[in-house]
Amino acid sequence: MDVFEKVKGNKGPLGQYAKEADGYFVFPKLEGEIKPRMMFRGKEVLAWSLNNYLGLANHPEVRKADAQAAADWGLGYPMGARAMSGHTRNHEILEEQLAEFEQKEACYLLNYGYQGMVSIIDSILDRKDVVVYDSEAHACIIDGLRMHIGKRFVFPHNDIENLEKQLVRAVKIAGESGGGVMVITEGVFGMSGDLGKLDEIVALKKKYNFRFLVDDAHGFGTMGETGAGVGEHLGVQDGIDLYFGTFAKSMALIGGFVCGDLDVINFLKYNMRSQIFAKSLPMPCVIGALKRLELLRSQPELKHKLWTIVEALQTGLKAKGFNLGNTQSPVTPVFLNGTTPEASNLVFDLRENYGVFCSIVVYPVVPKDVIMLRLIPTAVHTLEDVEYTINAFSAILGKLNNHEYNRDTIPTV
Ligand SMILES: Cc1ncc(COP(=O)(O)O)c(C=O)c1O
């Protein structure tokens, strides 16, 4: 049988909507400079779907540093993997600064957060080790665990009582096999916006012997007094053994990093396949990241502005009766009840008639007949943008409750 035969008719859980949704609900093209008002299919929209938390994507100093670095070095420099010929002093400087910022001994850069996480898990754990992880962990953790040939136990999202039960099993099995235990969770859960209970997990270290890996993709730059993330916010940064972050959100760039004790980071340098067998992060990304980190540290007002917008948006939506779940971070999910066609008609209305652009999440990512709209406030939104959006949301909620959206057919886009 031709291996392509099975992929022709079956596009997978997301691809099944490709015909109706392509270019609109999935793969939409937002055009123009990255700012709250962008163009979508020739019309201006108020964009709430970019993880540009601190507004750095289009910050004049960032744009200048990026352009200068591209002119000075080109996008190809350096050639080769770090270990072979792609190593530079700037890569080291960025690592030193990230380690210091995260209050860890050392740091290593990753070309992509996703691949880096897969590779961290793959390189550190062997068949004797046991992993305990949150059921809502990001795909990069789940995919890393697919490479893990030892035992793994999942605990229901943020259920610390259950986590402890899994830890008891894990510690016992690891004791018998001669391996260790690793707990993995997220700082900010990127879909729902709630925080991993890092403080409660760290407290369990007093009773059980394990190492703790945290994916803080959405917490880096947005949470904690200095922006160092959810570990800092909850006062348990010391208890995190490996702190993982990506440049794809607050830093508005590409790449990622992992921080921890020097001996562990040195091991990763020599064993992480995503970095050993891949070309080094390009110099403009490294120089661009140094500039962004400098701004993130020297301009706390960016984070304050972000939180002003977050609080106005979340308080305003709640006051109008919207269910935002348990978010404690800038990630703002809005849960509504309705069918997938209703959800798509509602989003079509929101985009076409109110000019508000946010992401939409439907079954199977959320339960059947739940619609999740996801808004990402940023430091460059204004309070007027917030007010306008809350009014638009009130209007669509009224229509949804009056069953004005078609329950059976997806709009033709
Ligand atoms: C929680 C989380 N972890 C990891 C990643 C992957 O990071 P990257 O985009 O740098 O590959 C993302 C998304 O970008 C994420 O939301």
Image (cartoon, rainbow, N blue to C red):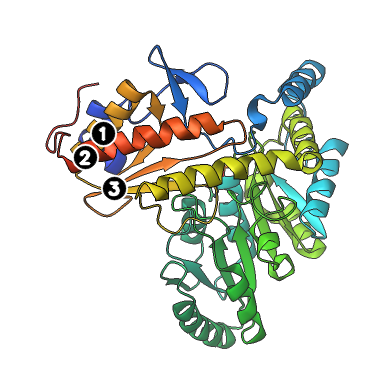
Disc with the residue nearer the chain's start (2 vs 1) = 1
In this view, the residue farthest toward the top is 42
Q: Inspect the image, locate mark 2, and give the three-letter code of the amino acid beneath it.
A: Leu
Q: Quadrant of the C terminus?
A: top left
Left or right, 88 with respect to 122, comes to right
Relative vertical location of residue 109 with respect to residue 346 in this rendering, above or below: below
Give x and y (percent) for residue 23: 34, 23
Q: Find the residue positioned furthest to the front.
A: 319
Q: Is residue 346 above or below residue 138?
A: above
Q: Earlier in the sequence, mark 1 or mark 3?
A: 3
Look at 51% across and 21% down and name the residue there.
Answer: 37
Horizontal side of residue 309 vs 349, given as left or right: right
Give residue 400's mark.
Answer: 2
Q: Is 6 on the left-hand or right-hand side of 283?
A: left
The amino acid type of the residue labelled 3 equals: Leu
Give, as a three-letter code, the residue at label 1.
Leu
> Which residue is found at the position 14% from the left and 32% from the top?
409
Residue at image x 64%, y 59%? 230
Residue 3 in the image: above or below residue 261? above
Whether residue 112 is visible here, answered yes or no, is no
In which quadrant is the N terminus drawn?
A: top left
Circle 3 residues within 10 Å: few <14, some 14–19, many ≥20: some
Horizontal and vertical percent position of residue 84? 78, 40
Judging depth in this view, the residue of 228 and 79 nearest the camera is 228
- Residue hosting label 1: 346
Residue identified by numbered label 3: 336
In the rendering, at what x and y percent does residue 24 appear? 33, 25
Residue 218 or residue 139, whichever sits in front: 218
Query: Contact (CB < 8 A) between labels 1 and 3?
Result: yes
Question: How far separated are the C-alphas under marks 1 and 3?
Answer: 11 Å
Residue at point 71%, 50% (across, down): 227
